[in-house]
Amino acid sequence: MLRVQRLGSLLAAFAVLTFGGPGTAGADPWPRERHGVLGSYRVVHDFDASIDRPGGPVGTSLIGPNGLYYGVSSNGGPTSEGTIYRMNADGSITTLHVFDTATGRDPGRGLTLGGDGQFYGTTTEGGPYHYGVVYRMSADGTYTVLHAFDDTPGGGRHPNTRLVEGPDGNFYGTTAGGGTHHGHGTFFRITPAGQLTTLYSFRNDGQHEPYTSSDFCFGPDGAIYAMGRNAAFRVAMDGSSAEMRRFSPEKHGFLGLPGLIRGTDGHLYGAMTEGGPRQGGTVFRLSLDGELTILHAFTGPNDPEYAGQAYRPTGPLMQAADGALYGTLTFGGKWGYGGAFRVVPGHGLQPLADFAGWGQSDTEGPIGALVQTADGFLLGTGYGGGLHHQGTVYALIPSP
């Protein structure tokens, strides 16, 4: 049986919980502590989207320099246009910034922690020109607009992916609109001081180049690696883009929405949301020279051997301290609301938990990547579900 050890800054308030044992939710109308096949799972915060509180968490959250959990929400707060929040050591939520039309709204892709200890992010809408902004926020909540997208010919509009800090200390992202090719979007670079440069203009919808909404990463060669519908791509700093690997929908899957991460072994890892040999999506490894290995194929409902398994990965993968890949699934599982999983290269898939959805005051709609605390917990968010149907923060404790 797993038991929670006393944690440092983030989860000290949850030290009395017994994971994997009898439910301890007290007055909760449903048992909220659940068994996974390997490890345990529990909802640790319910969003309510009240006048002074966030609701509908979106994007990827992160652990700040102080060990606390930071994220963004799409609604809640006095403007109902979203917030940046912090989850404190006692499980309470502090609203650090309230989004609005004037300074940016719709923060759909989450936060990035810069090497300078500041938080960076984007909003898809709002700002003085209504095309979205890039912003920086200090740990105490001081919010600064670094760049407001406008209607300059050839410039990007409506940023829609999480920023990535490059090896040069600048930040990189994409826009869904603008650019020089019929408004299909751009790759851009922005300095911490706010100087923005358009690197690349997209030509279509991801069929022959990267998606504008998927997470991407830097390779050891300093180039950006990103996913499209059926292929992986390399984008160089001079603005050139080349397909590095084509995927077969039947053999490898399609819809590279989860994007790519760079593993500690130097390889690229990602997931395909649909297709593959079992029709429920795949997890894969990709070398920089294009060698593709399917690490797991999820079984979807159109497969003859489907028996209720969770399927359809949509959020980015993350690699934990144990070297394994962790992710979430949006459909299927015991209650039909998806679940969380671990993939150990060479050992296949290990299910961790099943989400039970709003009907049982539990998580649904897992969104963004999982993050790991210094104590080994994995934390994630669900856009829906919970006691108030406004989303949750949940904790996973994987077994060794």
Image (cartoon, rainbow, N blue to C red):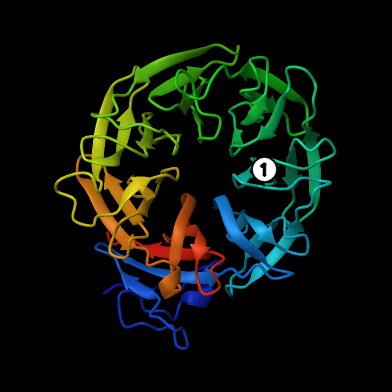
Amino acid marked by disc 1: Gly
User: What is the residue that sits farthest to the left in this orientation?
Assistant: 305
Mark 1 element type: strand
161 vs 185, nearest the viewer? 185
The residue singled out by tag 1 in the image is: 121
Q: Position of residue 208 (x, y in %)?
A: 45, 17
Question: Which x, y percent locates residue 379?
Answer: 47, 59
Evaluate whether residue 78 shows in this view.
Answer: yes
Up the image or down, 339 lies above or below 132; here it is below
Q: Quadrant of the N terminus?
A: bottom left
Residue drawn at (36%, 79%), measured in percent from left and top?
18
326 on left or right of 114: left
Residue 111, above or below 381: above
198 and 347: which one is in front? 198
Name the image quarter holding the C terminus. bottom left
**Residue 20 to residue 282: above or below:** below
Residue count near mark 1 (Cα–Cα under 10 Å), binned few <14, some 14–19, many ≥20: many
Foreground of the two, 148 or 22: 148
Q: Position of residue 173 (x, y in %)?
A: 62, 31
**For residue 197, side relative to residue 263 (left or right):** right
